[in-house]
Amino acid sequence: MIAASKSSHRDSSAKALRNTSFWFAAVALLCLSMADLDISTPNPWGELGLMAAGALSPTVWSWPTLLTSLANTFSFALQGIALASTVGFLLALGYKFTLVRAFCAFIRSIHELFWALLFIQIAGLSSLTGLLAIAIPYAGTLAKIYGELFEEVDPSPINNLPSQSLNLSRSLSHFCYTVLPLAWRSMATYTSYRFECAIRSSAILGFVGLPTIGFHLETTLSEGNYSEAAAFFYALLLLIATLRFWLQKRLLPLYLIGAFYYLPPQAQTSWQLVKRFISEDIVPTPLRGQANLNAESLGAFGQWCNQLWQHQIWPGLVNTMLLGQIVLVFTGLLALLLFPLNSPLFFRGWRGFGDAILILLRTLPEYLLAFLGLLIFGPSMVPAILALGIHNGAIIGHLVGRHTDELTLRADVGTGLNLYFYEVLPRIYRQFLAFLFYRWEVILRETAILGILGITTLGFYIDSAFEEFRFDRALLLILASAMLNIGVDHFARWLRQRLHLKSIPESL
Amino acid sequence: MNLPLFEFTNQRLTYEGRLVLDNLCLRIQPGERVALIGGSGSGKSTLLKALREQCPDQIAWCPQQPGLVPMLSTFHNIYMGALQRHSVFYNLANLIKPLPAAKRAVSEIAQAIELQHQLFSPVDRLSGGQQQRTSIGRALIQERSVFLGDEPVSGIDEYQSEVLLNLIFQRHNTVVLALHDVAQALRVCTRVIGLKDGAIILDAPSAELEASDLADIYGISDSSLNPPRQ
């Protein structure tokens, strides 16, 4: 009786996984039919050929430029992650408070490029802008991960200590002797993975004008100067690939001091400028300069909101969700296709090589990939789908592949497709969905940001608002994208709980 | 008559929502050495937990599962019991580099529980018995008047465990221990409480008891009362 009810429970849970997958795919197909998939460039293959030729003949136009932009990219990333992990740690200490959680969710729901666009208005294209643009959203992410790690550690050591009264300094001592050492290793691993992400973010900040490697990538690529672009691109890959050899734990303080010495965070700004930005520029136009709110100004404000909603927020939201849904399912398909590259069950001897491919694909910044796609295919959703799918598919494929290490299969198991579909896929599917839904929030955030490249997601309207110096609009649009991300994050968490998906926060 | 240290009148004790002990009436006076005996699931741990909650500020607690922090040294795991006596800055400094005064205090205890040679090795390199000693050390350093232990010496051989129990008696006024070794319970404690099926079925001074009186509690024959130990 018990066995029967158990197996029927398992059946229904497997069915729930199947149904969920079906509906996600069906909605994505529907979205695909509504998406703008035009290829508007006359000769995409020709452009691709030129890029390939450039990739094969990298040319360094100026070594000092290359090295400075590399050093800037590295410095922003290291400073950003140092500040983010400190602030994130402090926030994580209070992670059990809903208010702290909500604050963290809010600051990480705004992409680093949007933060950069905001700070540029106040602090210009300065080193302070670069540092804050990385540190703020990363602090939110790290706080979440640290907070979850603290909750997951073995509770018995702290429970065995003598009674804990509500004395802050006493509970801090207890925390540092029990929870912190237990979580330390996972925190360090995750932070170092996030540092790699921060280098990508730092590189991308160049696309909005900061002096990192993205600045030169954007210039050279836009000019069709693919050989020079290739040199910058390889330099970035080399920087990330060799990190583990020269960025050692013991040398970290040295590098950090070096980074702050080389690129001290400063900005030419004044309080007047900041005050004006906050008290005037970002205040909705109809309310600006009004000491008292009256019916007339409120009416105008309502109209302003309505206009903005109809012409920008709603279309932006729809396109972001449409594209996000397609990308999510495409990412999933690619991950399922790619994970055997990092699995001992499929590529025994070649696994190191296979995983190197996945890590390489993961290392490519999605924004850069989308930019390349745009040059090849012209402005449509195609470059965005490919770029986000490849980047995120490689990340999830890498993790799912590593998860297959833990499978123990019988000795006479099949090979090839039989092995894949009968033995491995059913066993990893639950974990795969967990990873995918965990990644959903990130995918949506990236989908919004690709609007800056001309795809009509929220980022498109935000970027236009900044270009027209309509900061009130920009802020409202950014808040709309933040709300969308927070909403999706909640939905994904609800879905993970409903489907009983466990997800460890490692490397996502 | 002294005021009792612990007192229960018609108390219901539950574990994870399940009723474990019903209509519990029990008094324990300061200065007593009480052994709790009973089969697994008879409610020893639940009773200890309830005792612990009655006067948390006087109690040094030694659980069955040591619950140590594996990546920290024996020194730090023992020192943990004394955290609340020092400021957070002192504790943090001591976490990074052991401070002389803390070293003296912990060494004295490590000597007594024979862990002086393992003091600075990570506690996950220690054997099960040594980890159990560390857990006792963490309770001793608290310098409380009451010691509560849930099988504190279960992984340690008979001779050594008696040495450790005597150490515990020396340093605490009142001691309540869950013990599975009935003969040992009779030897070292002044009072034995037997638990079975959610009730106290035996409560007497150990001087008035023999091992055979306790057979009933386990529901097994006399001969298997003291199972051979490794």
Image (tube, rainbow, N blue to C red):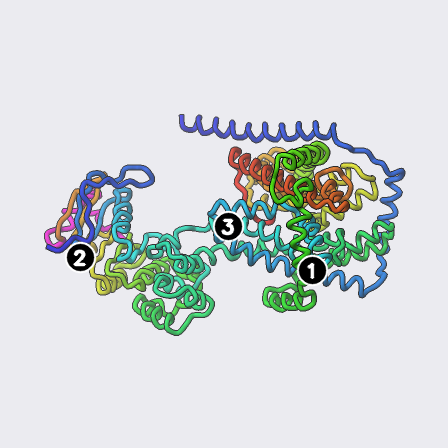
SS assignment at label 3: helix
Q: Are marks 2 and 3 on the same chain?
A: no
| Whole-percent x, y for residue A502 in the image | 52, 40
Q: Residues within 10 Å of mark 2 (few under 14, many from 20)?
A: some
Residue A297 sits above or below residue B69 on the image: above
The residue at the point 88 percent across, 47 percent down is: A50
Residue A263 visible? The answer is yes
Residue found at x 77% / y 32%: A36
Residue drawn at x 26%, y 39% as measured from the top left = B20
Q: Chain of mark 3?
A: A
Disc 1 designates what residue? A269
Chain containing mark 1: A
Expressed as whole percent of the image width and height from the top left, the position of residue A304 reads 69, 36
Q: Amino acid at mark 3?
A: Gly
Q: Earlier in the sequence, mark 1 or mark 3?
A: 3
**Does the segment drawn in magenta span residue A170?**
no
Residue B225: in magenta span: yes
Q: Nearer the viewer, mark 1 or mark 3?
A: 1
**What residue does disc 3 label?**
A147
**Mark in the foreground, 1 or 2:** 1
Q: Disc 1 to disc 3, how far (Cα)?
A: 35 Å
Q: Nearer the viewer, residue A343 or A475?
A: A475
Nearest to the eye among marks 2 and 3: give it.
3
Q: Using the numbered discs, state the Cα–Cα distance from disc 1 to disc 2 in whole angstroms.
A: 70 Å
Mark sitting on residue B30: 2
Q: Is residue A451 left or right of residue A180?
A: right
The residue under the point 73% across, 40% down is: A461
Which quadrant is home to the N terminus of chain A?
Answer: top left
Q: Is residue A282 above or below residue A167?
A: above
Q: What range of the chain is rendered magenta?
A: B206-230
Q: Tag 1's secondary structure? A: loop
Tell me if I can see residue A412 in this picture: no
